[in-house]
Image: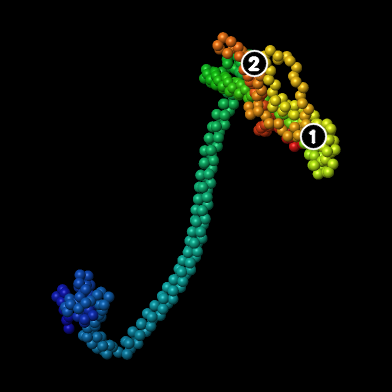
Amino acid sequence: MKIGCVICAGTVQKDAFAAAPCGHAFHLTCLNEWLKHQKTCPQCRESCTPRRTLRLYLEDANTTINMSSQLDQLSAQDLKEKLQEMESLSKEKDEALKKAKKELEEIRQEVTAWQAQCDGAQFKIEKEKAISESLKHKLKLVQSEQEILKEKAKEATELKEKVHTLERIELLLSGTRDEAHEVIFNSSSTSLSNYVIALKSEYDTLNERKVVLQREKDKYLREVTNLKHKVRSLNMDLQSANSDVLTLRADLQSAEVEKDNLRKKVHLLEKALESPNSRTTLQRILESPMPEALAKRQKLMANDCSPQLSTGKDENAEPAASKPISLTEALVPVRKLNNGATSTISSGFNGFGGQSMFIKPKAKAQAKKPFKFAPRAITNDNSKQTKLLAMKLKF
């Protein structure tokens, strides 16, 4: 029986036969090539994929019949011989298989050993790589330190040269004349120019420093002078304040004494008014001496309130005898004039070719202003004096 392929229109061989899911058979290569372009059966157009194809293995019936006839023709002896041959071949194959298995086992052991050696070598390689990396890092550090040392050595050389130059300059500045001549004669033109430049810069620096110090000196002298003036003025203010404080204390003491005397007088007057025999008590009060401060004040008040009018001709005449001061006048304050000034009668030109009399007022006496103590700012210079003044004011 011959099977034809619809795709290539050829016969299908037994070793290259494949069927689609629908049951149609084709060449295996033709079907695979067809399915690359279309996913359907070439004959019935049913869906088909390479995974769903089924490969078929067919045997020819004529070949099997021929083999059975040949086996019938063989004798039993031949079959035994062939069986022995097959057994011997089987034994050889078994021995070969055992030998191959043994060799395979040996090879596996060798592979395992080689694998272990390979792992050890790999570990050593990794370790060597790590050591190499650390050595490379250390080498980089050493190289960087070497560069730093080179720079430091270069700086040290430059500093040595500078120190040598500075020593020569110091020798020029502070040495003797012979040493300076020796330095100049033994030095080259370049170093000599460097010495001159250094000396010039040092000279300029000293001049600038001198100017700055002179300015600071003048400034401090001015400050000292100002402070001295301030201290002097503060001392004068302190002395005047002390004198004013003493004056005020004396006035306060006299006022206290006068106050006590007046209290006594008032107390006696109250008793005199309350007692039935007030005449003798009042007479005793009138006969008691008046305080000196009250008498002085009463005289001043009398002079201010009753000015004496005098003419220009009899200015040297003796004043009239003053009246005796009574107790009521001493206790009751006398009213002063509104303007507080005194006047005198005088004669002079009247502007019409003759003379006339007129009242000439005297200048008003300026009252003494009360002392006002204004505390000053306490400084470090007069702190002790201000503390003493504060203690005095407390008392």
For label 2, the residue is 346
Q: Coloured how? A: rainbow
Instruction: Work out whether 122 lies above or below 327.
Output: below
Dot 1, how many residues are within 10 Å of its Cα: few (below 14), some (14-19), or many (20+)?
some
Q: Residue at x 65, y 28 (%)?
A: 337
Three-letter code for the amino acid on which mark 2 is drawn: Ser
Q: In the image shown, does 47 or 5 lie closer to the viewer?
A: 47
| Residue occupying image coordinates x 38% and y 83% | 87
Which residue is identified by label 1?
257
Percent position (x, y) of residue 175?
64, 17
User: For residue 386, what is the image quadrant?
Assistant: top right
Q: 305 or 2, which lies in front?
A: 305
Q: Quadrant of residue 178?
A: top right
Residues packed near mark 2 inside 10 Å, few (<14), some (14 to 19) or many (20 plus): some
Q: In x, y percent, where is residue 309?
A: 68, 20
Q: Nearer the viewer, mark 1 or mark 2?
A: 2
Drawn side of residue 79 relative to residue 36, left or right: right
Q: Residue at x 57, y 31 (%)?
A: 156
* Image position of 201 (left or right of 72): right
